[in-house]
Amino acid sequence: MIGRIRKAINNVYDAWCAQDGRHYTLRIKGKVLRLDEWEYNPLAVGDDVEFTPYSQDEGLIIRRLARSSSFTRWNIKLEKNQTIAANMDQVAIITSAWEPPFRPRFLDRALTCVHGCDVIIVMNKCDYDLTQEEFDRWALYHKLGYRIIAVSARSGENIDELKTLLEGKTTAFVGQSGVGKSTLVNLIIDPERKQATNSISEKYQRGRHTTNHSLYLERGAIAIIDTPGVRELLVPYEEKSVLAASFVEFARYAADCSYGPDCTHTGEPGCAVIRALEDGLIDPDRYTSYLGMYQSLDERKPGYLRNRFRKNKQ
């Protein structure tokens, strides 16, 4: 039988099976799920799994089916990729205009973590003003081809428009702690639902974590994977060329680089991306984001030095 994971806590998975219309509590058969990839968690909310039931509502997971999409980050502590959500139609990256302030570098990193699906960039707390510099950086994402929308969970501004973008799709909500992600989920899924929200850390202007694990939630034709708030995101790539490809504005010029597909866009003579940067065709702050991510990959421990025998967290 095939089930879709809707909750995963401490090696126990809640799954929905469309074949018989039932919920099942599942565990991995033999406790270890054999995968081709080396990653932190073998299963994420949204994953489709094959399982064998051994009672009316329990079963053992045999294998994970191929993912059509994912939101994946690098787990620096365990030196492995960690998938936060899988098999969604789109990812809504939630940011805010105030407390915590707009952080475009975080947003740039979040965009590199999306694989195989569309992106909506949501600015919450839009009833607070951005500086001109912040607004220009926010508007840049629209110019790059991303769908953007400004909303306010407090006043309700543009919440109906956001719901329209979510209709008929499964959307993973991701974002920093404190941006109001859980509050937005409450408004969309069930205004009466008292999911925990929390205040901002005054010292660091960062939110306190409120969602401790990913949850699959539904209302009508809207399905949301609500993920825990994060403070930092690290690029999940190993290949630097993949990182460069995730910056959509580079693609317009990279084909003309003297070094061809091997160009790193970090200083090679004849690099068309750098030439476009110098001509004002690429935003310098976005390029600085790219350099920071590129350097983080340079500093990452080589694969052969990592502890590949460390047990996967299931």
Image: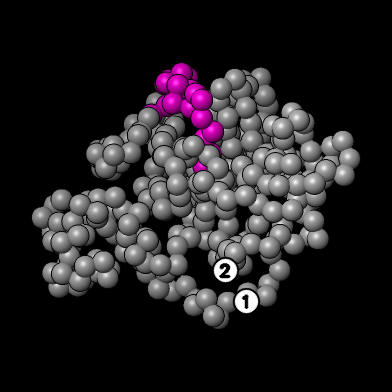
Quarter the N terminus occupies: top right
Magenta highlight range = 150-174
Q: Amino acid at mark 2?
A: Glu
Residue at screen point 49% across, 55% down: 233
Verify whether residue 52 appears in magenta: no
Outermost residue to the left:
279
Report the Cα–Cα distance between label 2 and label 1: 8 Å
94 with respect to 148 (left or right): right
Q: Which residue is mark 2?
A: 79
Verify whether residue 168 appears in magenta: yes
Residue 225 on image: x %, y %: 59, 37
Q: Are marks 2 and 1 in contact (CB under 8 Å)?
A: yes
Closer to the chain start, of discs 2 and 1, is 2
Quarter the C terminus occupies: bottom right
Q: Which residue is mark 1?
A: 307
Residue at screen point 79% across, 60% down: 31
Residue 143 on image: x %, y %: 24, 39
- Callout 2: helix, strand or loop? loop
